[in-house]
Amino acid sequence: MTEEELYAQCIALLFAGHETTRNLIGNGMYTLLQHPQETAELREKPQMIRFAVEELLRYESPVQLTARVLKEEFKVCGQPIRKGWTVLCMLGAANRDPKQFKEPNQLNLNRLNNQHLAFSAGLHFCIGAQLARLEGQIAILNLVQRFPEMKLAGPRPEWASTFGFRGLKGLPVIM
């Protein structure tokens, strides 16, 4: 591995291993605070946390898009897509696809067969997915259980203006 490749891997690990998990927890808590009945159910049934985190990943994905450079030409709906072109895969939109998810705009912490793309898929599936899931499960369940009176403080929080990631600048709450 060259020094440049080593730096690139370190940067990728920083963003993939920190920024996305931070956004999973922040986006997840923001979503739960907007859905108090679902939050109460999770508090009462902590065994739901695995399904809940999968749904939060689908519903408010920390990574909204990914890019791929095509190695070969192919067609989409009869339209040729050329080798070497960059294609943006809109993961956040795919996670709301009504052909894949029943009532995709509804939060359902008990959703079964949740084949979301928050961690991408195939060869590009996130190497840290299991760690991110575990961190999200621990953090979100602990926050929900330890602070049952937590509520949003004021109007909608501000989203960070980043390309491809979706996360909050902050999450003001009242305990």
Image: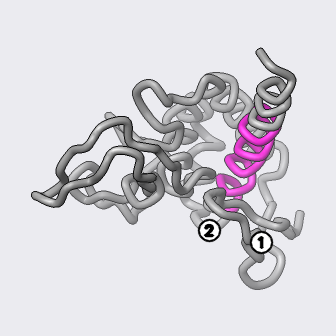
Question: Quick check: 4 left or right of 102?
Answer: right
Q: In this rendered view, identify the residue nearer to me: 43 or 116.
A: 116
Asked if the stretch drawn in magenta spans residue 26, the answer is yes
Q: Disc 1, disc 2: CB below 8 Å?
A: yes
Quarter of the view holding residue 103: bottom left
Question: Quick check: 71 left or right of 39?
Answer: left
Provide the residue designation for mark 2.
Answer: 34
Residue 55: where, in percent of width, then height? 49, 46
**Going 10% across and 58% down the picture, which residue do you hit?**
78
Q: In this rendered view, identify the residue nearer to me: 15 or 44.
A: 15
Furthest residue toward top: 1
Residue span colored magenta: 13-30
Q: Secondary structure at mark 1?
A: strand
Residue 43: where, in percent of width, then height? 65, 43
- What is the number of callouts on the image? 2
Provide the residue designation for mark 1.
Answer: 152
Q: Secondary structure at mark 2?
A: helix
Find the distance from the CA under tag 1 to the CA under tag 2: 8 Å
For label 1, the crowd category at 10 Å Cα-Cα, with few meaning under 14, some 14 to 19 and many 20 or more, is some
Tell me if residue 133 comes above or below residue 162 in the rendering: above
Quarter of the image where the C terminus is located: bottom right
Residue 98: where, in percent of width, then height? 25, 59
Main SS, magenta residues: helix
Quarter of the image where the N terminus is located: top right
Q: Amino acid at mark 2?
A: Gln
**Going 61% across and 41% down the picture, which residue do you hit?**
44
Quarter of the view holding residue 99: bottom left
Residue 133: where, in percent of width, then height? 63, 31
Q: Amino acid at mark 1?
A: Leu
Asked if the stretch drawn in magenta spans residue 133, the answer is no
Q: Earlier in the sequence, mark 1 or mark 2?
A: 2
Tell me if residue 168 comes above or below residue 75 in the rendering: below
